[in-house]
């Protein structure tokens, strides 16, 4: 009896440790600003649409796996009219082709965004971004897995477990990769602007120095 109670106490303590909030995680889990959330919805819709088109235009699109993948992706697409209010960026830029992710799908992208930001903290990714770490942690996150499992029953076809896992990995993989390209592009753009500002500042100093030299130079009459 004593040994059984001891084991129960140890198990309970282990669960408390696992469920205790991590300060670093709390910082990452803060709600995104409205513009950031709009960008996440837009990027998430792009990812879903891109993967759908990839399977739809594939020469193997009639296979069972591709049909299941297409069905799973469609289940991630929001068809409700409420999308006009909840996803204003997608709506304002939509010309009939942009997808709007459902709430469940947004949970997946939100978690992927959080793990991506963890790998891109200031001073950590100036030379490289560990996207594989962000992808792996996102795919293993319980909220991500449960959210995608909740999406699967909404699909028009029965989705095999292997197809479901592959699709979840494909969605997160493309989201993180596209986000990485955008992130790097922004860094390069900011660097170019900074370089132009430095050159402009140097040019102004050179012009000012030349102007001072001309003023101090004595007037010569031939």
Image (spheres, grey):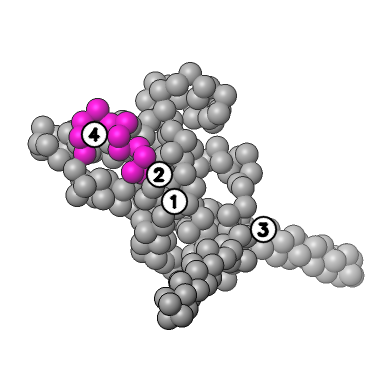
Determine if the magenta segment contains residue 148: yes
Residue 211 at least partly seen: yes
Q: Does the residue at mark 1 contact the one at mark 4 (Cβ under 8 Å)?
A: no
Furthest toward the front, the residue is 1
Disc 2 from disc 3: Cα separation: 46 Å
**Residue holding disc 4:** 70
Question: Which residue is found at the position 39% from the left and 47% from the top?
Answer: 146
Q: Horizontal placement of 197 versus 116: left or right?
A: right
Question: Which residue is found at the position 49% from the left and 30% from the top?
Answer: 90
The C terminus - image quarter: bottom right
**Residue holding disc 2:** 147
Residue nearest the viewer, comparing 164 with 181: 164
Q: Which numbered disc covers residue 197?
A: 3
Question: Which residue is found at the position 24% from the left and 27% from the top?
Answer: 156
Q: Does the residue at mark 1 contact the one at mark 2 (Cβ under 8 Å)?
A: yes
**Residue holding disc 1:** 143
Disc 1 from disc 3: Cα separation: 45 Å
């Amino acid at each position: 009896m004593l040994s059984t109670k001891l084991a129960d106490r140890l198990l309970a303590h282990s669960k408390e440790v696992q469920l205790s909030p991590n300060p670093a995680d709390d910082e990452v889990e803060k709600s995104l600003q409205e513009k950031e959330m709009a960008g996440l919805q837009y990027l998430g819709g792009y990812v879903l649409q891109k993967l759908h088109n990839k399977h739809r235009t594939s020469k193997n699109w009639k296979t069972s796996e591709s049909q299941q993948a297409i069905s799973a992706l469609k289940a991630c697409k929001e068809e409700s009219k409420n999308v006009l209010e909840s996803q204003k960026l997608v709506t304002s830029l939509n010309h009939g082709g942009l997808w709007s992710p459902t709430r469940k799908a947004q949970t997946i992208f939100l978690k992927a965004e959080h793990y991506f930001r963890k790998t891109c903290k200031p001073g950590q990714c100036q030379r490289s971004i560990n996207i594989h770490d962000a992808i792996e942690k996102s795919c293993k996150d319980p909220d991500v897995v449960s959210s995608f499992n909740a999406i699967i029953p909404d699909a028009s076809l029965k989705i095999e477990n292997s197809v479901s896992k592959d699709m979840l990995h494909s969605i997160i993989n493309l989201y993180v990769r596209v986000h990485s390209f955008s992130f790097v592009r922004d860094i390069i753009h900011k660097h170019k602007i900074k370089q132009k500002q430095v050159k402009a500042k140097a040019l102004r100093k050179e012009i000012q120095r030349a102007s001072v030299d001309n003023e101090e130079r004595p007037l010569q009459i031939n």
